[in-house]
Each structure stands twice: as structure tokens, then as C-alpha cells.
Amino acid sequence: MEQLKQAILKQAGESWVDLIGFAARDRFDALEGAANPFSLFPEGKTVIMVGRRITRGALRGVEEGTNLADYSMFGQSWLNDTFLSQSTFDLVHCLERAGWDAMPVVPGKPSPGVDFAYAAVACGLAEIGLDGQVLTPRFGPRQRWHMILTDAPLASDPLLDRTVCDQCGQCVDLCPLGALDRQSSTTRLICGKTFTVAAINHELCKKCPNGVLGPADSLGQPDRTAMFCSRTCIEHLNEQGLVENRFKQPLRKRPAWRQDADGRPLPALDGAGKPVQD
């Protein structure tokens, strides 16, 4: 099986996969019902998580408030449905050439209830941040995920042994709609790892005009990657050196625009998160 795993990793490199991790079935014993990916493939033995980066440049127009449309293609639809799908297909092809079944699974309506966040942690690729988003050491929240279920009994990768989220709380404190509540935080346990997660009002998030919402994920939650909270997180992680894919220039080059739930302008924020008065 190690030879097969190495062949999959080789194919991943050739197919522009940025993130790949493996988790055996036993790591999902705590998940019940539709949240457990093996509810889709009862004979499966292994989950393979496949990720590709959301380029920071795709967020540039959103951060500036000048071009929100291109993110919806390069950061969402094209990335998920074309670029990442091709990478996932290549890996499925690799497994099937070796004689193993491989089921590709994508987030959203085709896989209602499947917990992709849990799977990313179980595969040793990520943690859950204070704002409930999946964070990786390479990109923070900037990635899209697909999943492959296979009956090949592949060894699990080690769980992530470092922290990405430093619990700075900026995502909570600066949310334009007040959709995050640190005082009502909960803890989430995944494969023995505990994460503190602020309470999230997803109905408010769905109304947020401060970034592209996009389609809901497999749990019915809105895509928050381009929203003000995530862009603030991306900037903070880059400044603090908490991610590997760092940039020479900041994402937030000028006071950041914000709007309330009705689209009315709120005071812009400077780099320290302080309102800028006209």
C-alpha cells in the first residue's frame, strides 16, 4: 500500500494539488449519519482530502471594493468545478488504474451533510479557527477542498502538530454584522484535538455584503472566504508569519471598506482595526 500512496502523491504533484492528506476509516468513528463520508461509500477504507489554493490575487478586487466578480470565478466556480475537479479526477484515475474503487466527493448539494472540516483535520491538513473556518499552515483559510473515498486501505497521515489560529479575536471584534460571538464559544473535538470556536449566526453571514457569498457548503453554511472577517484573518496570519505562503506586500494596503446588512457604508478601518473618520 505504501507504493500506491507514493504513486498518488506523485500524481498529486503533477496535477497541481497543493494539499493532500490521508485518513483511515477509524478516524471517522465519532461522526454519525450523513456527516460521516463513509455513509456514501460503506465499503470504503480511506478518505483522501485534496486541496488547491485560492490565490490571494483573486481576493485583491474584493479587498479594494473594485471587482468582486472575478473572485466568484477564480476563487469559487472555476477553481472548484474545473481546476480542482481536474486534479481530483486525475487522482481517481490513478487509483482506478491500480484496481481500487475511488469515489470523488465535492462540497455542497451533491454531498449534503458530509463534514469536510472534520475530514481536513482528520487527514492531518488543518485545524478549526476561532471563526469556525478551516485553516491550514500553508494558506490559512485560502483553499478549496474535494474528497476521495477509496476501498484501498491506506495509512493515515499524522495529525497536524502546530497551531495556525492564535485566537487574536479580530474576526469576532471587527465583524461588520456582529455575527460572531466569542462569549458564547464552544469547543469542538476532532480526533483528540480540541478547538475553541465562536458562536456563529449563519443567517446573518448569508446577508453579509462585505464579500462574495457564493454557494453554501455541504452543511448549508455560506462561503466566507472573501468576506471581511476572512480577509482580516488572511492579513493577520501573513503579518504574524503564521502561514507558509507569505507575501512581500500586505493584502490590506488602505482603510478597509465595510457595509452593514442593508448595504449602507460603515466607517472604514485602518490597519490596526480602528475606524477612519472622514
Image: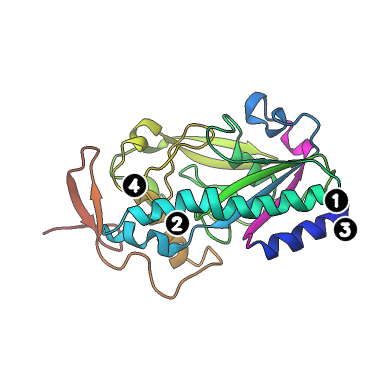
Residue of label 3 = 3
Q: Which residue is label 4 attached to?
A: 173
For label 2, the SS is helix
Looking at the rendered image, the disc whose residue lies closer to the viewer, 4 or 2, is 2
Q: Secondary structure at mark 3?
A: helix
In the image, is residue 175 part of the stretch drawn in magenta?
no
Q: Are marks 4 and 2 in contact (CB under 8 Å)?
A: no
Disc nearer the start of the sequence (4/2): 2
Residue in the image at 53% along x and 41% along y: 196
- Residue tagged 1: 98
* Residue depth check, mark 4 versus mark 3: number of the one nearer the observer: 3
- Where's residue 140, x and y in %? 52, 56
Q: Nearer the viewer, mark 1 or mark 3?
A: 1
The first of marks 1 and 3 along the sequence is 3
Measure the C-alpha gap from mark 4 to mark 3.
48 Å
Q: Is the residue marked by circle 1 packed among few (<14), some (14-19), or many (20+) residues within 10 Å? A: few
Q: Position of residue 217 (x, y in %)?
A: 50, 37
Q: Which mark is residue 74?
A: 2
Q: Secondary structure at mark 1?
A: loop
Q: Quadrant of residue 103?
A: top right
